[in-house]
Image (cartoon, helix red, strand yellow):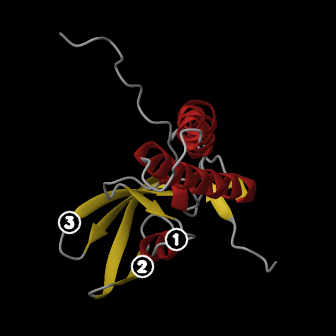
Amino acid sequence: MADEAKNYITPPGFRRLQDELARLWKVERPPIVATVAWAAGNGDRSENADYIYGKRRLREIDRRIRYLSKALDRAVVVDNSGKTYERIRFGATVTILYSTGDEREVTIVGVDELDVGDARVSWRSPLARALLTAKVGDTVTVRAPRGPERVEIIAVRYDDLRPPARDVRAKD
């Protein structure tokens, strides 16, 4: 197999993938396997909804398990939290200033760690590629969909990237 691109990931991101894989194997998959086995024993599988939809869900889970297993095997865990570097590296939280005057804070993380918002960007994204190896005070050009944009790097820090603890107390 050709050299695959490295799958850089932060320690908390690696733990999240491991937790998801364990949950799929130990919590979600076993009851579905039991349901499919029970449904298969009932005879005609062509009109058995438990069997048909159970097999479909089982395929989805198995596909995700394969993906997670491969991602974890290729993962290169990089922990830069609490460190200081002259140049921007993986795991940095960077404050940038656009030419329009808008300020934005982004954290450079692995491709498997992105969230719904725009606070975390993949190290493979055009923005992160432009920022990596630059330093505070530099102005870099980002290849954006609407054309090249110039951004100035205002601040860089290396935070502990663990998600904030959730309040698990019962709500009234």
Q: Is residue 121 above or below residue 43?
A: below
Q: Is residue 94 left or right of residue 62?
A: left
Rendered-image quadrant of the C terminus:
top left
Residue identifier under label 2: 140
The quadrant where residue 147 appears: bottom left
Residue drawn at point x = 37 percent, y = 25 percent: 166
Q: Is residue 148 above or below residue 154?
A: below
What x and y, as percent, mark residue 44? 51, 50
Question: Which amino acid type corresponds to the residue marked 3 in the rendered image?
Answer: Asp
Question: Which amino acid type corresponds to the residue marked 2 in the rendered image?
Answer: Val
Residue drawn at point x = 69 percent, y = 67 percent: 6
Question: Which amino acid type corresponds to the residue marked 1 in the rendered image?
Answer: Ala
Residue identifier under label 1: 134
What x and y, as percent, mark residue 3? 78, 77
Q: Nearest the camera: 31 or 135? A: 31
Tag 3: Cα neighbours inside 10 Å, few (<14), some, or many (≥20)? few
Question: Farthest residue in the bottom direction?
Answer: 147
- How much space separates mark 3 and mark 2, taking CA atoms? 15 Å
Tag 2: Cα neighbours inside 10 Å, few (<14), some, or many (≥20)? many
Residue identifier under label 3: 102
- How much space separates mark 2 and mark 1, taking CA atoms? 8 Å
